[in-house]
Image (cartoon, rainbow, N blue to C red):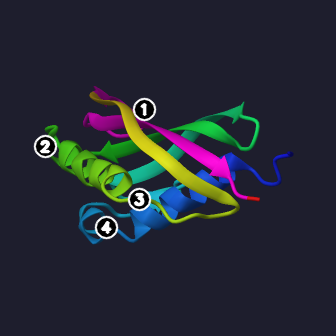
Amino acid sequence: MTMTSSALLAVQKALFTRLNSTVLLKALVTGVFDDVPQGQAFPYVVVGEDTSSPWYSKTTEGHEVTTTIHTWSSYRGFKQIKSIHAEIIKAITGKPFENTEGYAFMNVRMDFEEVFSEGDGVHTQSIRHGVIRFRIHVQQIF
């Protein structure tokens, strides 16, 4: 058997669809991005870095994908970004994903979540940056 499409692209498309169709999340952020437009207002979400490791059995094959989601906020405390994280986690782990791009989603779980302050070199106030990493197992559909 041979992989016929990118597991990373399939997972990214599924995540964007899920996050952009989550009403409660969309009410909290100005957008969900792959590349943030210059001058974008806070808060927002970026679907970022990912990895893919293939796995095989005698009859199936697939990938273990890790995807990192970044959240950005200019709110002076941590409450806003933690509220955004709660909606992201519910959106991604709360219900099964549809099969997409030749892959069936088998297992989705959160690896870790972190929230911290960081200056961005442009804004005078501190920016809140959140990171959530998910581990997603997909199986190739033939």
- Residue at 58% x, 38% y: name it: 65
Q: Are marks 2 and 4 in contact (CB under 8 Å)?
A: no
Q: Identify residue for label 4.
A: 26
Secondary element at image label 2 = helix
Is 29 magenta? The answer is: no
Residue at the front extreme of this rendering:
58
Q: What residue is at 16 percent from the left and 38 percent from the top?
A: 78
User: Mark 2 or mark 4: which comes first in sequence?
Assistant: 4
**Rendered image quadrant of residue 99:** bottom right
Q: Answer left or right for 38 relative to 25.
A: right
Q: Give the range drawn in magenta.
A: 117-141
Pointers 4 and 1 in contact (CB under 8 A)? Answer: no
Residue beneath disc 3: 96
Residue 4: horizontal and vertical position, in percent? 83, 54
Q: Nearer the viewer, residue 128 or 65?
A: 65
Proximity of marks 3 and 1: CB atoms separated by less than 8 Å? no
97 vs 78: above or below: below
Q: Which badge, 3 or 1, is on the more N-terminal residue?
A: 3
**Image x and y of residue 122, in percent:** 41, 38
- Label at residue 79: 2
What's the amino acid at mark 2? Lys
Q: Nearer the viewer, mark 2 or mark 1?
A: 2
Front-lying residue, 73 or 121: 73
| Label 4, residues with CA under 10 Å away: few <14, some 14-19, many ≥20 | some
123 or 106, which lies in front? Answer: 106
Q: Is residue 98 left or right of residue 130?
A: right
For badge 3, the amino acid type reads Pro
- Using the image, determine if residue 11 lies above or below residue 137: below
| Structural distance between the alpha carbons of marks 3 and 2 | 28 Å
